[in-house]
Each structure stands twice: as C-alpha cells, then as structure tokens.
C-alpha cells in the first residue's frame, strides 16, 4: 500500500511537470470573423489551422479560439457558404501568448482563394478557361501594395512590355498600350486612344482647351496638351483592382482605339488604415476606412502626396491633395444596390523663382477636379441585371508662366491711333502668360 501511494505521488508530480513544460511551449489563437457588408460577427464559419488537425466553428458573435497550440507559424483557413475560401498567412503563435485579430469576409461567387497578408487582400484566381476573348491583364490590391505605387501611372508599369521607372510624380504620367513613347510631341495624340474608366465613369481629356504655354520645357512635362489624361491625378492607395484590355474591348466603353483601362476603387466596409511613405524625393500619406450597417455602408479615403523633381533645387515640386466619399445602400435582400460617390482632387505643379536664374522663370499649373456619380444595379433574375449610371465631372485648370525675354532692339509704342511720339527701344522684357 505504501508503494502504491508513493507511485501515485510521483506520477502526479511528473504529470504536473510535463503539463507545465508543455504549456510553456504553446500559445493560443483567437479572433472574430465579421462580414464586410454589415460589420457584424458571422456565426457558423468553419475555421481550420492549416497543417494541424484542428478545426472549429465561430459562435453566434463570430468569435473563435484554439487553445494550447504549439508555438510556430501557421495559416488560418476560413470557409462559409457564399463567401468562398479565405486564407490568412503568417499567423505567429508565441510561447505563452495569444494571437488575436479580426477577419473580414465578403460575399463572392468567385472560385479563387483570397489571401490576407498584413491586412492586404490578395486573390488567387482558379479560372480554367478565360471568359473574355480579348487580351487582358488583371492587377489586384496585393500587386499594387508590392510596388509601393503612388498613382495609377505607377500601377500600369506592371503591364508586360511597359517601361519600369522609380515610383514618383515629378513628370506627367500617361499610358501607352501598343504604342510609342508619348513624351514626344508627335506621339502625344496616341494617349487619346486609351479609354480610362474609374468606377464605370469615363475619364477623358477631350474638353481640355489649354494652349501650349511653355510649361513643358523638354525635360519636364507638367500639362497634357493634345494628349490623354494625367494619371498622377488618381491615387493608388484607394484602388481595389485594375483591368487592362489590350485587345478589342466591349462596345460599351467606346471612344478608344488602343484599349481600355478599368479601375475599381475601394467601397463598402473596410478596416481603418493609415499609411505613410517617404523617401528623399516622394512623400505620401493616405487614410481610408469604412463603416458598415445592415443595409448601408460608408467608405472614405484622404490622400496627400508631394514629389520633388530635384532634391538639390528648392521650389520645384508636384503636390496632390485628394479625397473620395462612397455611400452604398441595399434593398430587397440586396438585389438592389445604390452607390453614390463624390471625388475631389487638387493639383499644384510649381516651379518657383530660383536664385541665380538669369531669365527669372516661374511656372505653375494649378488645377482641380470634382466628380459625382450615382449607380443603381437591380438583379431581377439570376442572369439578368438592370444598371443605371449618372455622372457629372468638373475640371478647372490655371496655367501661368513668367520669364525674361531677351532679343534684338525693338520698338514698343503705346499709340492707338496714327501719329508721332517718342519711341521706346527695349532689348528685353518680362513676359507673363496666364491660361485659365
């Protein structure tokens, strides 16, 4: 009896020591699964730890947890009917620590898998046969984040065959699909052939009535006279996806000769995110987020960017200030979607007076763009949809150049009628030109 009692005592001590050592090498995983559309917790979502035989379902509040998971790097898999498959990578479980995060699922009929890496959504397509007959390139938000883009012009460098340059906004950026470089005057008309669509609204330069004021000096291009739009106006951090059609696009896009670029901006409920990028030439800050209710969602984005053309020269810079506000409403069990968007961008492209410049040159191109769009989609059947879109766009450009003009002696007269007066002989004068 005494031997049995001692054996039981030693066994309890060993189990206690083993349990302590095991617990010291484990951690916990917990989180909340929410719907992107409503922002509320989702019940019954299957959660699985990839590589371990551990699965669970979320409770009515969308919460889940895994206890005593060996320390290491894991991937979480989330599956729910109508939401596809979402994978979160790089889930680090530390010894004696609890990993916690919020996961947002969005309804989707896509067969691809969605990956979340550091808050960035990446979609892996599983399309066996293409649905379109034209040559297209799809760029997701994960690709945009990878290249640290500042504008749509930087994003389009991911297209095969495009020239790759350092991200920045010191020069006008335009797209050239199957065309030559648009910086040459003879080739600038080529940019007219590419249609830019932002949230189904065409963005064009057809109404640009500027004249050549000398703002483009051969080395620096500040305005887009007789060519396409300046892609620096469209901030990259608010773009969800970009589709480039290099083949023959649908007739719905119209007004094109060389392809179409379809841009979709972020909308609906999204987590709040502040991002700041900086290097010696470029500085950019972006803040975006969204609120979600049962049948409504509000999304916003604020962007500020500044780019120096030459860090050795003061007063030669490009500045962009922009914002976008989206309001979405849903009716009849989300068969009707009504989305309203307000967009505003302010541009300051300046060359201030430089010390030692004998021509005392000053240049500026200040402009703003305001756009409103409303779109109504009604899914009246499984394969039928009615869409209505209305948009209004306002552009204002103000160009200015001042410099000293030197030439041979000339005569300047102020007379408005024939006659004789004392002449004014000048060899140089200050020229100021505004185009509004």
Image (tube, helix red, strand yellow):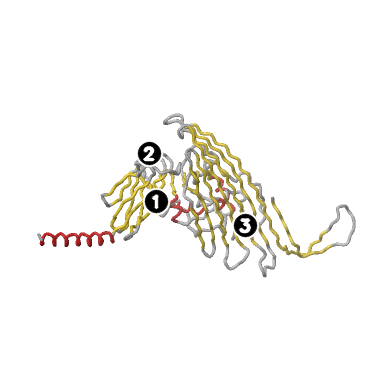
Numbered badge on residue 349: 3
Q: What is the CA distance from the residue labelled 1 to the residue labelled 3? A: 37 Å
Q: Are marks 2 and 3 in contact (CB under 8 Å)?
A: no
Disc 1 to disc 2, how far (Cα)?
Answer: 18 Å
| 66 and 345: which is toward the camera | 66
What's the mark number on residue 116?
Answer: 1
Q: Residues within 10 Å of mark 2 (few under 14, many from 20)?
A: few
> Residue 414: horizontal and vertical position, in percent?
84, 57
- 10 Å crowding of disc 1: few (<14), some (14-19), many (20+): some
Left or right of 362: which side holds 135? left
In the figure, is residue 48 to the left or right of 256? left
Q: Residue at x 46, y 53 (%)?
A: 144
- Circle nearer the viewer, 2 or 3: 2
**Where residue 233 appears, x then y in whole percent?**
57, 51
Q: Position of residue 287 (x, y in %)?
A: 52, 53
| Nearer to me, 403 or 418 | 403
Give the residue number, with chain letter if any, for mark 2: 82
Task: Answer whether residue 342 is visible to the viewer in this image.
Answer: yes
């Amino acid at each position: 009896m005494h031997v049995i009692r001692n054996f039981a005592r030693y066994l309890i001590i060993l189990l206690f020591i083993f349990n302590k050592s095991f617990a010291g090498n484990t951690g916990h995983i917990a989180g909340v699964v929410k719907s992107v559309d409503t922002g509320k917790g989702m019940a019954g979502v299957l959660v699985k730890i990839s590589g371990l035989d551990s699965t669970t379902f979320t409770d009515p509040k969308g919460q889940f947890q895994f206890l005593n998971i060996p320390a290491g790097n894991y991937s979480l898999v989330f599956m729910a009917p109508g939401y596809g498959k979402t994978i979160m990578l790089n889930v680090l479980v530390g010894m004696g620590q609890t990993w916690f995060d919020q996961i947002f699922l969005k309804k989707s009929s896509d067969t691809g898998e969605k990956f979340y890496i550091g808050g960035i959504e990446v979609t892996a397509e599983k399309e066996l046969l293409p649905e379109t007959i034209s040559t297209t390139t799809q760029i997701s938000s994960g690709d945009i984040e990878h290249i640290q883009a500042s504008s749509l012009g930087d994003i389009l460098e991911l297209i095969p065959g495009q020239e790759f340059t350092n991200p920045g906004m010191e020069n006008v950026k335009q797209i050239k699909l199957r065309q030559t470089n648009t910086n040459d005057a003879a080739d600038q008309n080529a940019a007219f052939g590419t249609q830019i669509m932002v949230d189904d609204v065409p963005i064009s330069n057809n109404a640009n009535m500027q004249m050549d004021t000398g703002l483009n000096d051969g080395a620096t291009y500040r305005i887009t006279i007789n060519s396409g739009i300046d892609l620096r106006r469209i901030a990259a951090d608010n773009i969800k996806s970009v589709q480039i059609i290099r083949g023959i696009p649908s007739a719905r896009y119209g007004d094109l000769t060389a392809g179409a670029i379809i841009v979709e901006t972020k909308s609906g409920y999204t987590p709040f995110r502040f991002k700041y990028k900086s290097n010696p030439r470029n500085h950019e800050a972006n803040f975006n987020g969204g609120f979600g209710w049962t049948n409504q969602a509000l999304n916003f984005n604020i962007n500020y960017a500044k780019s120096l053309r030459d860090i050795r020269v003061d007063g030669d810079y490009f500045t962009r200030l922009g914002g976008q506000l989206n309001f979405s409403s849903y009716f009849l069990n989300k068969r009707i979607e009504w989305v309203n968007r307000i967009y505003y961008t302010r541009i300051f492209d300046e060359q201030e007076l430089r010390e030692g410049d004998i021509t005392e040159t000053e240049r500026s191109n200040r402009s703003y763009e305001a756009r409103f769009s409303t779109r109504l989609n009604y899914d009246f059947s499984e394969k039928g949809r009615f869409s209505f879109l209305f948009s209004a766009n306002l552009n204002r450009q103000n160009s200015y150049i001042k410099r000293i003009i030197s030439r041979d002696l000339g005569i300047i007269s102020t007379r408005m009628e024939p006659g004789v007066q004392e002449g004014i002989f000048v060899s140089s004068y200050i020229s100021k030109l505004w185009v509004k």
